Image: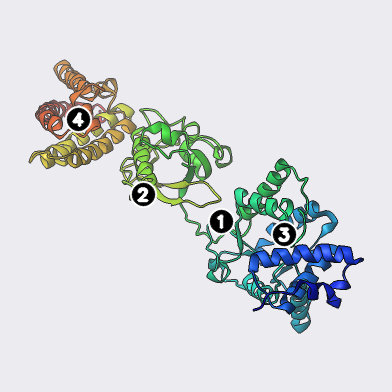
Amino acid sequence: MTEVDIDRVLKDPRVRALTKSSVEREALAQKAVDYIRGKFKTLHFEETVRSIVKGLDAKKNAVTVFIAYQEEDAAVADCLKGRLEEFGSDRLDVHTFTDRRDNAGGEQWRQTMIAKIKRSNWFIAILPDEKTGSRWPLYEAAVFEGSKTATDLLIVVTRPGAARPEQLEDYHGFVGNVDEMFQMFDQLMREPNQLPGWGPVNPHLRDDTVQAAAEEVAREFRESAKPVEWEFFVKYVELDVSGMTSATGKPPGVLDAKVLSCKGAEEIFGVSDKAAVGRPFGDVIKAIYDERHGKAWISELGKAVKDVLAGRVPTPVRTSFCAFEEGRDFHPHLSSMSRSTAGPFSVRVTFTPSLVARVSNVPRALDAFMTTVRLSHRFRWELLEQFQGGIRSSEDVERFERLLVRMETEGMVSGTLDPSLVLEEVEDESHRATIARIYKEWEVLRTEEGDLTKALNTGNAELLKKTLPKLWVLNRDFMRVAVAAAPGVVMKHWR
């Protein structure tokens, strides 16, 4: 490469033909040459002339803009074309070309497309996600790159979350979100030298107008070209947890999350799917968020979300709850998450019918009493026997808590945590007095200041270990009196 001779460039007949006077020609060409020299240092004479001629032609007529896209991004391309034409007025001549070949066929179609590409000053390639398999806009970008001059712009716009092809890494690149679409419009319309020697295309554009255009294009990116998704035959709710960056696992964090989509909300929560979308999750589930239906699953769900936000594998949600339709119990699962540059950080919670759902026509007091006996039996063998060898760490405490909360949730659903409901079936006064005393002692242990609750909340292994003997006594005393009272309770309903 050699230094460009400016005088020779100005005298070239191709340059002279595009200006009305030597003064205009010299001014425009000098600006272009200065820009090219400052950017590229040295250029071949022919390449310099070709660059200036193409730039002066755009100055005289209009900047030719070519937007390449595949059919699934048609809404994005149309929106972008409309805004560029609006902002550029008569200074931009915008064309779009897609991979659809309805309007022309064979070689004629191909030659028409290639000719338009080579005449373009700005080439905007809207690239699809590589997962779709289409490479057509990338092919068109390669055609433009092979014919572009030093004054031309190759602009690559990628779908949020998609990678930009390595061969286009050196060119202007924007992601189809609001911030970067604002930058693109701002650069093309309000910054000078988008063609060397030019001032801004539209320096009077207001920020709010550019912002509105950026939001419009970004919205089309989100709503078009959606990837194929499996549709599973499950009930679910998708929650926006973007605002829970400092999630603690406490219920309010999950309850404040906005519902993005759902299926089966009416059966589970008593709210239609349509009415649930856009509302806080706590508002959607308020009809079942009580002790009778069960609250513990929300606490566990909050912990699982906290794990996800911290980059850990989420702790499984182990508890079920009673749905709005009585007699239906559901088990929630934190099944997936979605995080992208364009959309929110969301999690999907699926709900499957619980295998321990209650029979709906059992007398409620009888169901409460019999469930209490069964849970007391499980309490002995799943908790007390398992941990009698010792509780040595906070991990042991956490495991103990998970098992206990699962039992307590089942107790909430059937009413076993309501002493009046359990005692309703017991006729012997001494049995009633003993059961009432055990409930009171349990309640003391489970208050905020109770030893059991404090040990679980703080992960205090020593305190939980000291509490275990009390739990053994309560469990033994309850089973002794419950077994004695059971025949009378059962036979009341077989008389």
In the figure, residue 175 lies in which quadrant?
bottom right
Residue bearing mark 3: 194
Identify which amino acid the numbered label 1 is placed on.
Answer: Pro
Provide residue 42's location: percent of width, then percent of height.
Answer: 65, 73
Mark whose residue sits in front, 4 or 1: 1
Q: CA distance from mark 4 to mark 2?
A: 27 Å
Look at the image and tell me whether residue 62 can be seen: no
Identify which amino acid the numbered label 2 is placed on.
Answer: Gly
Provide residue 84's location: percent of width, then percent of height.
Answer: 76, 55
Image quadrant for the C terminus?
Answer: top left
- Which of disc 2 and disc 1 is earlier in sequence? 1
Mark 2: few/some/many CA within 10 Å (<14, 14-19, 20+): few
Q: Are marks 1 and 2 in contact (CB under 8 Å)?
A: no
Mark 3: few/some/many CA within 10 Å (<14, 14-19, 20+): many
- Which of disc 1 and disc 3 is earlier in sequence? 1
Q: Secondary structure at mark 1?
A: loop
Q: CA distance from mark 4 to mark 1?
A: 46 Å
The residue under the point 21% across, 20% down is: 444
